[in-house]
Amino acid sequence: MASLIQVTLKRSLSKCTDKQIATLQGLGLRKRSQSKILMDTPAIRGMVMKVQHMLDVKAFDGDDSLRDSARLRKQRAAQG
């Protein structure tokens, strides 16, 4: 199992620079209080560090399948 982190946007996107908004969108965060479970890679860590004042980051000890989209879960269920 790969190491995972859960990032939660704790502030709104108002008064953010365009670069910060692009970084948050790259992390998949668009609304306040929205959370995402992401792989703990150097690229993701770098993005988190750029907007760390706006995020709440926690280590996530869950199953990696929680990261799958509904479309991928349907495909997997149809196959087997």
Image (tube, helix red, strand yellow):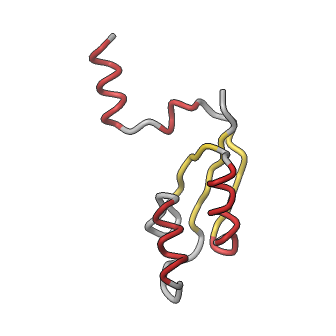
Q: Indicate left or right for 72 with 8 as reference.
A: left
The structure residue drawn at horizontal position 52% and vertical position 59%, both measured from the top left corner, is 27
Residue that sits furthest to the bottom in the current view:
15
The structure residue drawn at horizontal position 57% and vertical position 66%, both measured from the top left corner, is 9
Image: 21 above or below 58: below
Q: Indicate left or right for 42 with 73 as reference.
A: right
Q: Where is residue 75 in the image (x, y as percent from the top left)?
A: 30, 24
Q: Where is residue 57 in the image (x, y as percent from the top left)?
A: 69, 57
The structure residue drawn at horizontal position 68% and vertical position 42%, both measured from the top left corner, is 60
Number of callouts: 0
Q: Position of residue 29 (x, y in %)?
A: 48, 62
Q: Where is residue 59 in the image (x, y as percent from the top left)?
A: 72, 46
Q: Indicate left or right for 27 with 39 as reference.
A: left
Image: 60 above or below 20: above
Image: 18 above or below 43: below
Q: In which quarter of the image is the N terminus?
A: top right
Which corner quadrant of the image does residue 47 belong to?
bottom right
Q: Which of 21 and 55 is in front in this view?
A: 21
Which corner quadrant of the image does residue 52 belong to?
bottom right
